[in-house]
Image: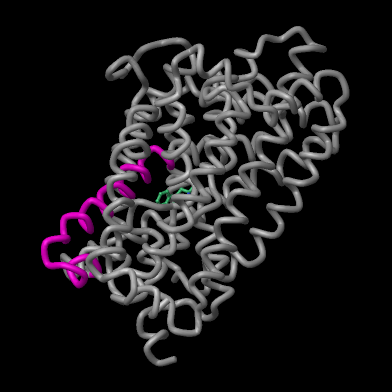
Amino acid sequence: MEETKKKNGFASGIGFIFAAAGSAVGLGNLWAFPYKTSQGGGAVFVLLYILCVLFIGVVTMLCEIYIGKRAQANPISAYKKAHKNLGFIGLVSIIIPFIITVYYSVLGGYTVKYTVNSFAGNAGILASFSNSKWQVILFTTIFIALALLIVMGGVKAGIEKASKILMPALFIIMVGVVIFSLCLGEGVSDGLKYYLKPDFKAVVHDDNWGKTILAAMGQAFFSLSLGMGAMLTYGSYTDNKVNLVKSTAMICIFDTLIALLSGLAIFPAVFHYTATEGVSQAELGMQGPGLLFATLPRIFENMGIAGKIVSFFFFAMVVIAAVTSVISLMEVVTQFVIQKFKLNRKIAIGIVSAIAFALSIPVGISLGSAFNNGTTLFIFGVDLLTLLDTITNTVLMPVTAFFACVTVGYIIGGKNAANEI
Ligand code: TRP
C-alpha cells in the first residue's frame, strides 16, 4: 500500500483496467477506425483489423504491461533493466507519444468545437471551421488546457475516477446512436454490407493487400495504445493484486467493441444519405479523415431538437475519450522530463504542453488546407497530420512493439515471464 501510494499508482485492479481502457479508447476508435475502414475497402479492413488485435495486439499489450510492472519504472529504465543495450527502445517509446500528442490535440480541438457548437448545428461546418486558423488554434488550446489541468491535478483521483464513470457512459450513448443509425431506413442494408461483408476481389484488384494489412496493423497498435510507453507506464503503476491476463483481455475487448460500434453508427448513415439526399460519399467524408466530422452531424440534424442534445453529449464524450487518451501520452513524456531534468511535475507538464501546442499550429493549418482541397504545408503530397500519423502508426509503433515482444520472449525469457505473469 505504501509502495503504491508513493508511486502514485492505481488504487485498484479495476481502476487500472478503466484507466488503461481510457487510454485505449479515444479518437483512434471513434475517428480513425471508421475512416481507415473506408480507405481500406470496408469489411476486408475490419476483418484484418480484428485479426491483428487477436494475434498481435493482445500479446503485445500483455508484454508491455508486464515489462512496466516488472520494472516499476519509466520506459528507458524498464528496457535497460531487461538488457543494458535496450535503452534506445525506451527513448523511442517516449518520443512517439510526444509526436502523437501534437496531432492528437489538433483533432481534440475539433471535438471541443463540435461539442460547444452542437446547439447551432454541426452539419456542413467542417470546411469553414477547419479553414479558420484562429478558431482551430483556439480550440486546440482549450483541449490541451483540459488535459494539462487533469494531469496536474493528479492521476489517481482524476483519471481513475473519471474513467470509471465516463467509459460506461460513452458506451451507452454509442449504443443509442448506433440504434438510431440502423433505423434510418433506405441505404442501411447497403451500409451494413459494405461494413460487414468482405469483398476480397476489390482489394485484390487494386493490388492493395500490403498497404491494407499494414494500415490495419498500425491502426490496431494505435487504438490499443501500444508500441510506446503508455501501457508500460500504466503497468508500472500496478501491483501484484492485478491479474495481467484478465486485465489485458478486458481492455482489448472493450476497445475493439467501441471501434466496431463507431463504424456501425457511421456506415449505414453514409449509405442512407447518399441514397436519399443525393450527397456524394466524398461530401460525407468517405475515404478521408473528415468522415466522423461530416457524417455524424447529419444524423444528429435528422433527430430534431433531441439531436442537438444527443450531439452535445456525444461530442462531449468524444472529448473525454480523447482527453483520457492524450493524458496517457503526456504522462509518458512528463514522467521522463521529471526524472531526467529533476523538475517538479507542474513545470514539467507546462513545458511539455507548451512545446506540443507550438508544434500543433502548423499541423492544424495543414489539416485545414487538406479539408479544403488545398496543399498548404504539405509534405510528400499529404498534410502533416496524415504524415505524422503514418510515420508513427506504420513504422515506429510496430518496430517498438516488436522489441517489446522480443524483450519478453527472448531476453527476459518466455518461461520466466509466463511464470511471473
Ligand atoms: N489509443 C488511443 C486512441 O485510440 C491513442 C493513444 C493514447 C495512444 N495513448 C497512446 C496510442 C499510446 C499509442 C500509444 O485514440
Q: In this view, does 329 lie above or below 79?
A: above
The N terminus, quarter of image? bottom left
Determine whether, in the image, residue 72 is placed left or right of residue 15.
Answer: left
Query: Which of the 4 image quadrants contains residue 327?
Result: bottom left
The answer to whether residue 290 is seen in the rendering is yes
- Dominant secondary structure (helix, strand or loop) of the stretch shown in magenta: helix
Q: Residue 353: x and y, percent?
A: 33, 51
The answer to whether residue 113 is seen in the rendering is no
Q: Is residue 208 above or below residue 221?
A: above
> Looking at the image, which is closer to me, 184 or 142?
184
Q: Residue at x 27, y 54 (%)?
A: 403
Numbered marks: total: 0
Q: In this view, does 268 lie above or below 164?
A: above
Q: Residue furthest front?
A: 415
Query: Which of the 4 image quadrants contains residue 71?
Result: bottom left
Q: Residue at x 50, y 41 (%)?
A: 108
Q: Residue 22: x and y, percent?
A: 54, 58
Determine whether, in the image, residue 324 is placed left or right of residue 416.
Answer: right
Q: Is residue 133 above or below residue 334?
A: above
Q: Residue at x 77, y 28 (%)?
A: 299
Q: Residue 329: x and y, percent?
A: 38, 54
Q: Residue at x 85, y 27 (%)?
A: 184
Q: Residue 318: x and y, percent?
A: 60, 45
Residue span colored magenta: 78-105
Determine whether, in the image, residue 316 is placed left or right of residue 23.
Answer: right
> Looking at the image, which is closer to me, 53 or 344?
53
Q: Does the magenta stretch include residue 202?
A: no
Colour style of the rendered protein structure: one colour
